Image (tube, grey):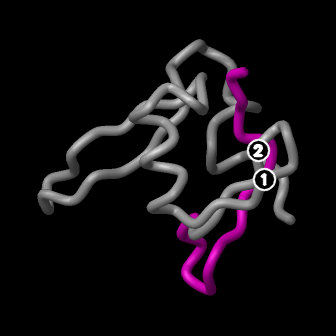
Amino acid sequence: MSETFVAVQKNGDGDITGFKTSSGRVLTYQQALSDVNQGVVIEANSFKGKDGEMYLRGNADGNPTNNLDNLPLF
């Protein structure tokens, strides 16, 4: 069964460090990246940043309320 991200944790700089899924699982950033790449979590995708690191972002759908940065904190 596919899941989505419903909430995030952020560090003092405002960077996302963790995710909560629609089934209630709490994931580190690396776990979330792996789950997105494996298709376990949908409505998000990974990309390589200019620094060569892999990052997550919500799928572009024109709705800013479900952007990962705009999800509620937990």
Residue at position x 21%, y 59% from top?
53
Inspect the magenta stretch and tell me whether residue 52 lies in it: no
What is the three-letter code of the residue carrying label 2? Thr
Left or right, 74 with reference to 16:
right
Sort mark 2 into few (<14), some (14-19) or many (20+) by Cα contacts within 10 Å.
some
Left or right, 24 with reference to 29:
right
Indicate the quadrant containing the N terminus: top left, top right, bottom left or bottom right. top right
Residue at position x 28%, y 52% from top?
54
Sort mark 1 into few (<14), some (14-19) or many (20+) by Cα contacts within 10 Å.
few
Count numbered badges in the picture. Answer: 2
Report the span colored magenta: 1-16
**Callout 1 touching callout 2 (CB < 8 Å):** yes
Secondary structure beneath dot 1 equals: loop
Determine which quarter of the picture holds residue 21: top right
Q: Is residue 1 above or below residue 20?
A: above
Q: Is residue 69 above or below residue 26?
A: above
Secondary structure beneath dot 2 equals: strand
Left or right, 61 with reference to 48:
right
Residue at position x 63%, y 65% from top?
18
Determine which quarter of the picture holds residue 62: top right
Q: Residue 73 in the image: x percent, y percent?
A: 82, 62
- Residue 59's disc is none
Nearer the observer, 31 or 58: 31
For label 1, the residue is: 25
Nearer the observer, 8 or 42: 42
Indicate the quadrant containing the C terminus: top left, top right, bottom left or bottom right. bottom right
Inspect the magenta stretch and tell me whether residue 2 lies in it: yes
Left or right, 14 with reference to 4:
left
Q: Residue 36 in the image: x percent, y percent?
A: 48, 36
For label 2, the residue is: 21
Q: Residue furthest bottom?
A: 12
What is the three-letter code of the residue carrying label 1? Arg
